[in-house]
Amino acid sequence: MNKILFALLLSTLLLSFNSLEAQDPFKITDTKLKKLGKTPEIKSIIDHEKASMFNKVTRKLNKKRPDNFKGRKYRNIQFPEREHQGNDPIRQREMGNRKNDPILNFDGLFSEFGSPHDPTGDLGLNHYVQAINGTQVGVFDLNGNEIEKFSSDVLWEEFGRSGAGDPIVLYDELENKWMITEFDDPALVLIAISNTSDPLGSYTAYEFATPSFPDYPKYAIWSNAIVFTTNEDGPGVLHNYFIQKDSLYAGADDVIMQRIEIDGSENTEAGFFVSTPVDFSGKDMPLDARPMIMRLNDSSWGEADQDQLELYLFDINWQNVDSTDIEQISMVTTPYDGYPCSDLGFGFDCVPQKDGTGLDAIPEVIMNVPMFRNFGAHESIVLSFITDVTNGENQSGIRWMELRRTNDETWNIPRRNICP
């Protein structure tokens, strides 16, 4: 029987664990990815595409707008007395002495797609690969020089597919492989895994359908799984997917995937709420092989008495969904207001800009992507999200947080910081 373990971590690091039988707080289903096939080397087919880059971008612009952003609209605050709890006590008011100038700064890709561009990218052994809505993919050397640019359709078109956007690019440091993915209408996910460390080499492509349109897909690589989360049916249910990495990387015909739904919140102010997966970085393996996702739990939503950070660890049994277990760790944090939006204009405006439209700051959601690293003496997860640094004046700041764990303890919050 599935079990879920709840744990409460106070900011004083007092820990309390309770193991309870689950009352169906989550739903697990399994399925398989459909293998599309292996592409030729990208560098060998870029100059021989069936359509020009212009035609490909135009075709994407003319595609039907997907049914995304479900549930996204302002909602009333459930517990307004918990929303503003004074000025943020950990607001950073002065610049520190440490200066970290960028090692390299160069122009990325541009398209006529319009907003949002949804830029994404990652760094490999010898390349930086970027993708933007359109969907264009750019390959740069480590000095920032553009080597090649191509439409993502070269990954899918020979299999009769065409992506619709929201691309994600990730590089697996352990396996030296690239992953490029995007969604397609009406409810399809396309994933391509490079067969070498060369981003212009060949890829093995897969697809799978989701029950509803997979809006706002966010991915992470773990030691034994590819994890991604979506917004499908609004904020009440959080959708989390786990793909068996070994078989995916091996180009297997049958690649197992589990879809796990966990409770979200219908009481958020933004009406848009998703979980965010934790991405593995480095060469030292995590001590705990369980992949993780995270979410906020603002006390003004009414589901907790204090503002919290929720961490979920998944023990995936690929052969039997009934034996997949979930551990939930709740960490009480310094109070935050996850919806510090002062520009409530058109669309998703949140943070005002001088002489411009408001920025969509993705309120009430942990920013993509939380990063995990094993430092030997301890393991760390670093993450960030926006909060109001004032007592209700909606001045948005980015709160930076680090979680730590050593061999003999569970995840905790050793320190917090914020930049206004």
Image (tube, helix red, strand yellow):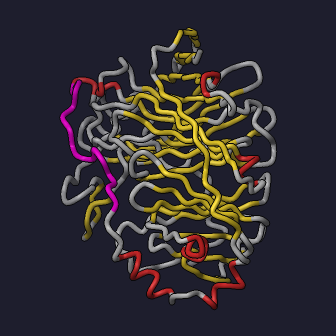
* Residue stretch in magenta: 66-80
**Looking at the image, which residue is at 69% across and 31% down?**
319
Residue 7 appears left or right of 104: left
**Quarter of the image with the N terminus in it:** top right
Residue 143: quadrant of the picture: bottom right
Query: Which residue occupies the foreground of this view, 150 or 386?
Result: 150
Residue 338: horizontal and vertical position, in percent? Answer: 35, 38
Residue 412: horizontal and vertical position, in percent? Answer: 60, 25
Does 203 sit above or below residue 297? below
**Looking at the image, which residue is at 29% across and 27% down?**
300
Does 227 sit above or below residue 105? above
Does 103 sit above or below residue 262? below
- Residue 384 counted in the magenta span: no
Residue 299: horizontal and vertical position, in percent? Answer: 34, 25
Residue 397 visible in the shown view: yes
Query: Which residue occupies the foreground of this view, 102 or 25?
Result: 25
Residue 95 visible in the shown view: no
Residue 397: horizontal and vertical position, in percent? Answer: 39, 47
**Looking at the image, which residue is at 72% across and 65% down?**
194
Residue 73 appears left or right of 372: left
**Looking at the image, which residue is at 61% across and 42% down?**
257
